[in-house]
Amino acid sequence: MFRDKARCPFPRASGGALSPKRRENPPAVTFPRLVLEVATVRALTSPFLFTASAPDCQDLLKHELTVGSSFRLAFSRPGLVTFKSDHPLSLSEPRRSRLATLEGLSLGGAKTLPELIALLERALGDARCPEGDAEPPPAHDALETAQTETWTLAVHPWPVAEDEEPTSEDRLAEARQAIENAWPLERRRGAFEVGILVPPVDRAHFGYFAFLRPLGASAPAAKVIPPSEAPSRAYSKLVEALEHFQLSLTPGSSALELGAAPGGATFALLERGISVIAVDPAEMGPTLASYARSRGLLLQHIKKPAQAIDGKDLPRLSSAPRYLISDMNVAPPVSAQYVLRARSLIKSSLDVAILTLKLNDTAALDALPRVLAELERAFGQPPQTAHLPSHRREIVAVLQRRP
C-alpha cells in the first residue's frame, strides 16, 4: 500500500483551494508524499484517491464522494482533489465519481520536473531518494522480479475554467519527454498506467501531480470547438458525447430532440445527415431551417414544452426516430420523466438516447443515482455516463438498444 514518508523532504499540504485569480508572486505549493509498497502489481493499493474535474463543478465532486462514504478531503487545488479512505483502494475497483474526468490512485505532487522524477522513482520502487533524505526507501524485490508487463505513460492537461488558457502542447511534451528519458521501456515494470497532470504556464506554481490508473482506462474526451454556424455550445456537448462513446449516427435517419433551442445540437445532427424533430417553446436559430433544406433534410420545430407533446405532434417520416436527444434545464428527476414520456412515443424505433442531466445543486446530485436507476429499469441496461469538456454543472447519460 502507500504510506506517508515523513523522512523525505516533502511536507504534507494543508488542503484548501487556491484562489483562481492570478498572483504575481504565488506562494510555494507543497504536496503529500506517498511511497508504494507491493508484493505484486495486483496488490497495488492506496488509501488516497486522485480525481481531476472541471473547477466549476468541484464542489459537487467533493459532495459526491464525501457524503455518506468513507472518504474525507485530503488535498485540493482548482481542477484537482484527492481524498483519503479509511480502507485501502485498489486499481481493480470501479470508478466512484461521475463528475471526475480522471480518477485513480494518488501518487502525490511535485513542484518541478526533477522532483516529479524523484517522486516516481520513489513511488514505483526504485531505491533512490533525493539528496537530503536520511534513509532511502526499501527496495521492492517483488516489484523487480514479479512483473513482466510494462506500464504506460499518459500526460494530461490540468483542468481549467472556460476563460483560462489550457496547458500548451509544449508543456505536455516537455513533461512526457522528461519522464521517458528517466524511465526507458526496460525500466517500466507493472501492469498499470502512470498519469501526470500538467498545469498551464500561468498555474505553474501548482506543480505536477502523479497518479495510477488501470491499463486501458479510457482517456478524457477531447474538447470540441463549435463552428461559427452552430447556435450554441450544445453542438460541442453532443459531438463530444458521440466521439467519447464512439457512437455512429446513420445518415438518413431521424432524431427527436427535447430542449432543442436555440439549436446547437440540432445543427450537429443536421450536419451528420439526421432529420430532426425539435421540441422547445423557445425560438430556434434562424439559419437552421434553410440549412436543413439545403441538405434535403426535415427540421420540424414543435413549439411546446417536452411534457406536452404527444403522438399527434410527430410528423410522418419515412422512418421513425432512432435517436432521442435531450438537454433540458430541469432537475434530473423531471428530465427523466419527460424523457421516458417521449420514449413511449418512439419506443419501437429508438436505438440510442443521449441525455444531458443538469446538476445545478447538491439536491440534483443526490437525486442522480435514483434517476439513473429509473432509466436503467426503463431501458433494460445501465446508462453510460461522463462529464465532458464542454459540460458545466451537468453530465451526459447514454443508453443504447441491446443488440
Image: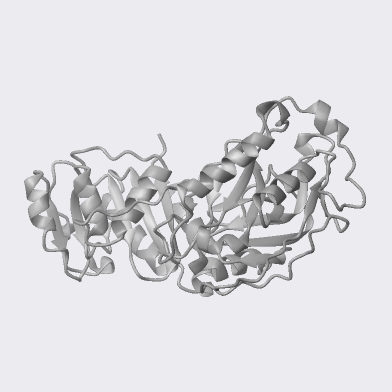
Q: Position of residue 318 (x, y in %)?
A: 13, 41
Q: Would residue 227 appear left or right of 75 to someone viewing this image?
A: left
Q: Would residue 352 appear left or right of 154 to someone viewing this image?
A: left
Q: Nearer the viewer, residue 19 or 48?
A: 19
Name the image quarter holding residue 355.
Answer: bottom left
Q: Is residue 277 above or below residue 141?
A: below
* Residue drawn 41% across the image and 64% down it: 162
* Residue drawn 61% across the image and 66% down it: 77
Q: Is residue 293 above or below residue 374?
A: above
Question: Is residue 344 visible to the viewer in this orientation of the structure?
Answer: yes
In the picture, the quarter occupied by the C terminus is top left
Q: Which colour style is shown?
A: one colour
Q: Position of residue 7 (x, y in %)?
A: 88, 56
Q: Position of residue 196 (x, y in %)?
A: 61, 48
Q: Residue furthest right?
A: 135
Name the image quarter holding residue 348.
Answer: top left
Q: Position of residue 178 (x, y in %)?
A: 62, 41
Count of labels in the image: 0
* Residue drawn 68% across the image and 42% down it: 92
Q: Is residue 230 above or below residue 253?
A: below
Question: Is residue 342 visible to the viewer in this orientation of the structure?
Answer: no
